[in-house]
Amino acid sequence: MEDKYSGMTVNERLYISGLIDQFYKAVEKKDKKLIISILKEIQLNDQSIEDILNSLKLNSDIADL
């Protein structure tokens, strides 16, 4: 699979993919499943997703990933 987001920050990935508004709405609603889905769509690995969830105070469970 081609990594079209190589070298980009998470916000850059969200912006380029057109998912930035959807992501921040999901964060506002604390919709962990949607957040995970969006972060997977922008090709983040499980550890990065877990780190982001922890930073958002949405304790992650590797089973959710």
Image (cartoon, rainbow, N blue to C red):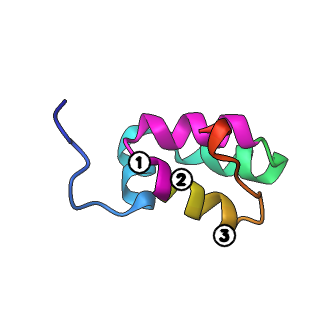
Q: What's the residue type where badge 1 is placed?
A: Leu
Residue identifier under label 2 = 49
Q: Is residue 27 positioned above or below 18 on the image?
A: below
Q: Quick check: marks 2 and 3 in contact, CB under 8 Å?
A: no
Instruction: Indicate whether residue 61 is drawn in magenta.
Output: no
Mark yes or no: residue 22 visible: no
User: In x, y percent, where is residue 28?
Assistant: 79, 53
Extreme residue in the left direction: 2
Decide: few, some or many residues near mark 1? Use Cα within 10 Å; few <14, some 14-19, many ≥20: some
Q: Position of residue 46 (x, y in %)?
A: 48, 48
- Residue occupying the point 81% across, 49% down: 30
Residue type, numbered disc 3: Ser
- Residue 42 visible somewhere in the drawing: yes
Gap in Å between the C-alphas at discs 2 and 3?
A: 10 Å
Q: Which residue is mark 3?
A: 55
Question: What number is the disc on residue 44?
Answer: 1
The answer to the question of whether label 2 and label 1 lie on touching residues, with beta carbons closer than 8 A, is yes
Left or right of 37: which side holds 28?
Answer: right
User: Residue at image x 19%, y 30%?
Assistant: 1
Task: Look at label 2 and name its amino acid.
Answer: Ile
Label 3 Cα crowd, 10 Å radius (few <14 / some 14-19 / many 20+)? few
- The magenta region covers 32-47
- Closer to us: 62 or 58: 62
Decide which of 20, 55 is in the foreground and name it. Answer: 55
